Image (cartoon, helix red, strand yellow):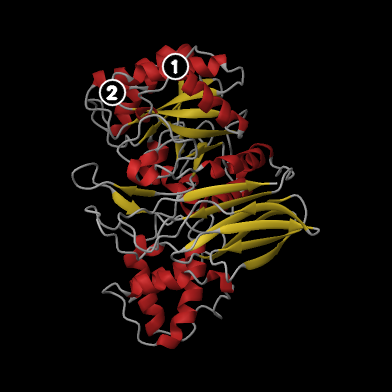
Amino acid sequence: MFFALSLAVALFSMGYSLPLPHKTRQAGGEKFVVAHHMVGNTFPYTTGDWMEDIQLAHANGIDAFALNVGTDSWQKDRVKDAFDAARDSDTGFKMFMSFDMAVNPCAGPEDAAALREYITTYASHPAQLRYNGKVFASTFAGESCTFGAATTEQGWKEQFTDQLTGEHATLFVPSFFMDPARFKSFSAMDGTFNWNGGWPTQLSASKLSETISFLNSNHTNHYNAPIPVPSTLNPIAGVVSALSSMPSLKIRDEGLIPDVESKLAAALAGAINLDSDTSIAANLGTSGDAGAGSVYMACVSPWFFTHYGPDSFNKNWIYRSDDWLYNTRWDQLIQSRDKIDIVQIVSWNDYGESHYIGPIKGAQPNSNEWVDGFDHQAWLQMTSYYATAFKTGQYPAIEKDQIFLTARPHPAKADASDDPVGRPTDFELTEDALWAVVFATAPAQVTLSTDPAKPEEFDVPAGVSKLRIPLVPGQGIAATMVRGGATLIEMEPDFNFEPNPVTYNYNAATFIGTA
């Protein structure tokens, strides 16, 4: 019971996210927005493919690619092509290494030497990202690597950073999945990348079902009045319904469901916050510390769904990506921009985890079944707005009217007729909703429809508005923008909310309409 109460209080206090605590930053650090690029998905790439990616990313406010490299020998050739294309693009676009330590070996000194070779090869390349005068480098994982030393700390220091001197001196900002309290004693680190900060990873269906049970059993209002929820939040009923089917949850009083739904809606939306960023920032050093430096790289990501069975990568789960995750997280990072040096978008092309914002190209990691036909470039096209605000401290003026739509292809509780992998873990957390973001140059009327008989109209002000309505099984989606009696945008994309899918797919389809 104590656990349920603690969880309920924690969840329901997440209605908004406080800025990060003040932290002394290293002087002279320029702000960057970078994107995670999986080199492992670029086997068929030519220099021309890299050039296309670079120009597209640059046009949308991205300054560099974090090149995620593994052990395939051919990846060295793709890395060379990437650096050379950036140099030849005349955009000032940069590259840096992000060593994927989930696949790169790190047991002996020779393994560290293989990583250092990338640094020494490209340190003097004009496309190498430098930060505070040093070669910038990062990782995915690596918190257990020793390279033959007695400890992880000694391994990274003695076999990696200490051996990179002069023009090869490296500013090392890894993503280590460990207790942040260790950071200050980790002298090889010049900062950290909070990979998991991009999603509300603390949410799970099992924990939320216990919370709902507690609210149902203790319906005296301990948390002030129920949080009012607009009628457009009806999809939250689907989340409650899905969670209600779990063995740990028994609804005793049907009359309490509206109150439970309103509290749950607020809790889920509030789960997108800066809590993990705050915890990590509190454990970073300041300029001149003997331990970890103060460079902080935050993560922003639009989605997460992966669907590999035991015969493959054995990854089958979602992170809740509702509540306009990409926009909401960006706004929070911009609010705390004076505490953040770099924002890394995860990802440009990680198709297997469904959070790509670039075009679908290259070689997919056997993810075609849930990726093909699910374009995400609507997220890319809104990136420049947020990247500019992060780098300058001012949101730019909206220069054109646009509507961005996001929807999943089938109900969360649908039964797939032929999917041996099964439903992903935590599928219960996602709402059957159409998520819309409106960029308006002036006040306008926006209509959203997931049922031709029941369109919903909204008056939107100039600026950015977030809207949502329930998806309807068997129906499509549509949107219009009208101003002064003139129709500026009319969208009816090729989309059907399929009630009877053959396989499970919790990826997102995105669409964009522009006046």
- The secondary structure type at the circle numbered 2 is loop
Residue 173 drawn at (x, y percent): 45, 32
Residue drawn at point x = 68 percent, y = 51 percent: 489
Residue drawn at point x = 37 percent, y = 78 percent: 214
Q: What amino acid is labelled 1 in the image? A: Asp
Q: What amino acid is labelled 2 in the image? A: Asp
Residue 130, can we see it? no
Residue 90 drawn at (x, y percent): 61, 17
Outermost residue, left direction? 311
Outermost residue, right direction? 484
Q: Residues within 10 Å of mark 2 (few under 14, many from 20)?
A: few
Asked whether, in this view, residue 18 is left or right of residue 489, the answer is left
Query: Compared to 147, does 192 lie above or below?
Result: below
Residue designated by label 1 = 81
- The secondary structure type at the circle numbered 1 is helix
The residue nearer to you, when weighing 102 against 367, is 367
Residue drawn at point x = 36 percent, y = 70 percent: 242
Task: Pick the quarter of the image with the N terminus.
Answer: bottom left
Residue 415, can we see it? yes
Earlier-in-chain disc, 1 versus 2: 2
Residue 325 drawn at (x, y percent): 51, 53
- What label does residue 72 carry, if any? 2
Q: Residues within 10 Å of mark 1 (few under 14, many from 20)?
A: some
Residue 66 drawn at (x, y percent): 46, 29
The residue nearer to you, when weighing 229 against 479, is 479
Quarter-wise, where is residue 435 in the image?
Answer: bottom right
Please state the total of marks drawn on the protein image: 2
